[in-house]
Image (cartoon, coloured by chain):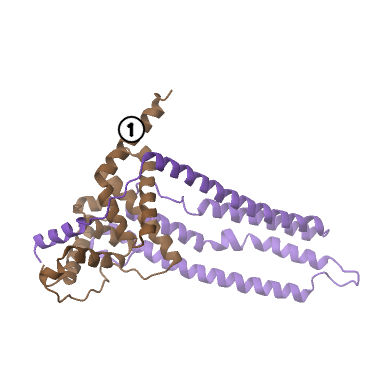
Amino acid sequence: MSADAFDTLRAAWRSNNEEPFTISVEQLQARARQLSRGIHRRNLAEYCAGALIAAIDGYYFLHFTSLLARAGSALMLAAIGWILLHLHQHSATGPIPTEALQSLDFLTRELTRQRDLLRHVWNWYLLPLIPGMTLFLLGLHQIKQPDGSPLVSEHAILHTVAACVIGFALIAFLNNRASGRLQQQIDQLHSMKAGPDTIHEHN
Amino acid sequence: MGSGPSAQANASNEEQYRQIVQEFSAPLTRLARGYEADPELRRDLLQEIHLALWMSLKSFDGRCTLRTWVYRIAHNVSASHIQRRRREKPSGLVTIEDLDIPSREETAEAALHGKEVRNRLIDLIAKLKPLDRQILLLYLEEVDAATIGEVTGISPGNVATKLHRIRQVLIRQFHPGV
């Protein structure tokens, strides 16, 4: 295949008769405002979700008189606040990337962000919930019903703890596996900068 | 009113944006075709690309050419688009090295019919992962290897290797007459 033949192929590609897309500056300004409103709405939705959780947790705080249950509620509220804050800070940088990063850097940054969210799931999602949940359950166990039995039995606590352990372990396992796959893709992207002998599969 | 530094900057950005439209609207339309087959979604993608370019011009400092800047933004927006689409509808994308293209048996005339060539190229592009897709699309736009390196951040050696592989794939795809 000669150089001319490659040129012919490229000319054929560029001979696409599709009408070139254009958009006026006024339309772009309108889209930018729309985008800004979209971000505002997303933030508002996150705050509303946080407020709803806080309201439910606040109800528990006021409803249960046990000090442990109250402390557990307060800790869970703090943990949920921390999780929402973390998600807000580490979610996608924005709906549209407007930085002129080189593609390798852009893809690496996106993959690294996703990897870190998955890899550190214990730090920002699972561990912060444990103290609050534990205290809350113990607090409920302390509260006695009119017949003298605890509001939440030891069996129920054990079942809840077992379900949490299994659930948390499963989340951690799946996230760890997914973050490993992302790390492989990141390594492969890094290798693209290194030299021609190190090309591997990349994202 | 309207004559301060901010207004001047806006006017300059608008001027640059008009330059981009004049020079790149056709290549960007083709680029979007390489990333999105669905016409409606492609229109959305093109709007996003133009919006990102328009919003990014404030930070354009001339450290690279406008062409490199435009392609970086356009490909990054498109790569994000692919990522979003893959989350909605997972599909297996491959590298140019892993692409398995059977040799074509048609004659050169048939293979080189313009529309057929474009359709085959689009099929080929759609199978590729974002970075390889970028390299092929830039190659098809006759962007030189050095600029491909600037846009993508890939080392010159790796760009050369990728381009070599792309040519091999094109030979197999459009074999035997071209």
In front: B111, or A106? Answer: B111
Q: Is residue A140 left or right of residue A85?
A: right
Q: Position of residue B173 (x, y in %)?
A: 19, 70
Q: Residue furthest right?
A: A147
The residue closer to the viewer here, B43 or A57, is: B43
- Looking at the image, can residue A106 be seen? no
Q: Position of residue B91 (x, y in %)?
A: 38, 70
**Which residue does the image show at 77% across and 58% down from the upper left?**
A60
| Relative vertical location of residue A163 with respect to residue A77 in this rendering, above or below | below
- What chain is the purple one? A
Q: Nearer the viewer, residue A203 or A173?
A: A203
Chain B drawn colour: brown
Identify whether A157 is placed above or below B146.
Answer: below
Note whether residue B175 is visible.
Answer: yes
Quadrant for residue A69, please give it: bottom right
Snapshot quadrant of residue B7:
top left
Of all chains, the one bearing label 1 is: B
Task: Please provide percent x and percent y for residue A63.
Answer: 81, 58
Image position of A88 (left or right of B98): right
Residue at the spot 65% in from the left edge and 61% down from the top edge = A129
In the visual, does B108 lie left or right of B88? left
Task: Please tell me how crowded label 1 is: few (under 14), some (14-19), or many (20+) other residues with Cα within 10 Å.
Answer: some
Residue at horizontal 30 percent and vertical 45 percent from the top: B69
Instruction: Tell me the residue that label 1 is attached to.
Output: B12
Residue A128: where, in percent of width, then height?
A: 63, 59
Quarter in which the N terminus of chain A is drawn: bottom left
Tag 1: amino acid: Ser
Helix, strand or loop at label 1? It is helix
